[in-house]
Image (cartoon, rainbow, N blue to C red):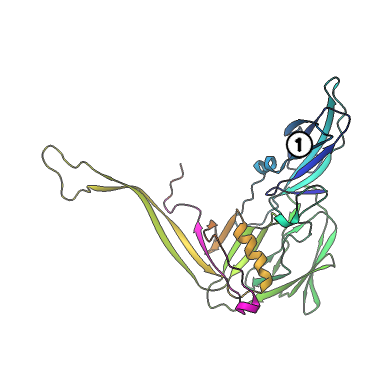
Amino acid sequence: MEKINIRSPYFIKYTDAVNDYVKLELFIYDGETVTDRGAATYTLQKTIPVNVVTFEISELIRDYLDVQFSGGYSSFMIWVDYRFTPGTIASGDGTPLAYNVCEAYDGYGYFNEGAQTPTNQYNEDLALISNDIIYHYASEQLYLPVRKDDTYSIVAKLDGVTKTTYNMLEELDYADRVAYPSWNTTTTPIDELIIDGVRSIQVELIEECKYEPIKVTFVNKFGALQDIWFFKNNSSSISAKSTDYKSNLMVNDTYSTTSHQNTTLNINGSEKLTINSGFYPESYNEVFKQLLLSEKVWILVDSVTYPVKITSKSLKFKTQLNEKLIEYALDLEFSNDIINNIR
């Protein structure tokens, strides 16, 4: 099945040396694949000038997929099918061709991965993370985003001994296509996750922390929710903004000396947070890169999930050769005003 990452362009090509034009029907839908396809969401048409026509469809799909997070880990993807109908000016539309069945995620590819097409797919792994080691706060639940497009197992081990096994089955409903198997690492410590008997992800549990760890959840390169823990000190600040004007205080021939001549209107503010990661291996540079590139980020504060945006616009990647110990500081801003002004 084709996998579309909608933050990068997705090009589909139609080749025809006989017909004058081709129509592209695009079906974007939730529910169960194929079964709930319904009517076409978009119908596009192009002439065929030199035997080949190319369509870019990811921008159309983005309107139908919005990843949200309020503390619970859910599947966020959508089905996207398409088919071509060639035609001639003389005879009109011909017979529609077969459907191409696709799944779409809020992910992306890098420039050096080339153009995204049916023959050049991004992010094909079953485990929807790039890193092969996870640093996790032992007192909290560990979640791993995976794609359920096949039958396979996830084995959790400690010192080579199997502790738990998840048996995954292929899911055809969009609400179950992405799963987040979890482990209570307080009661059942683990140090390795093996996916489909092939990919090994090491788990490093951090137990004692001088500071209260902060969990940041973000939409990663695969379009899945991923957690990253910040184990060191954090600091908060507040900034205010307002509109000022001068009031006319005169009433008849006098005014009150306790009234405000310079008046503040529509004052509101935002809270900011600086968080520090603690020491991470060099391989985690890719995770921090994806965090900085994410459009959706949330933070857990006092057991409450808040949307935030990363105000740090640059990050100098560190290496063990140069810096020995690698840690990062990030500036965040809560994505809402302090005073409720939603109308």
Which residue lies most toward the front here? 50
The magenta stretch spans residue 79: no
Task: Residue 174: tell me if it is visible.
Answer: no
The magenta stretch spans which residues? 315-339
Taking depth in this image into account, of 66 and 304 the one nearest to the observer is 66
Callout 1: few (<14), some (14-19), or many (20+) C-alpha neighbours within 10 Å? Answer: many
Q: Residue at x 56, y 61 (%)?
A: 299
Query: What residue is drawn where x is 66% and y is 44%?
Result: 62
Residue drawn 66% across the image and 69% down it: 284
Q: Is residue 253 above or below residue 318?
A: above
Front-most of residues 252 and 6: 6
Position above or below: 187 against 180: below
Amino acid type of the residue tagged 1 in the rendering: Leu
Q: Nearer the viewer, residue 164 or 7?
A: 7
Secondary structure beneath dot 1 equals: strand
Looking at the image, the residue that sits furthest to the top is 90
Residue beneath label 1, please?
Answer: 26
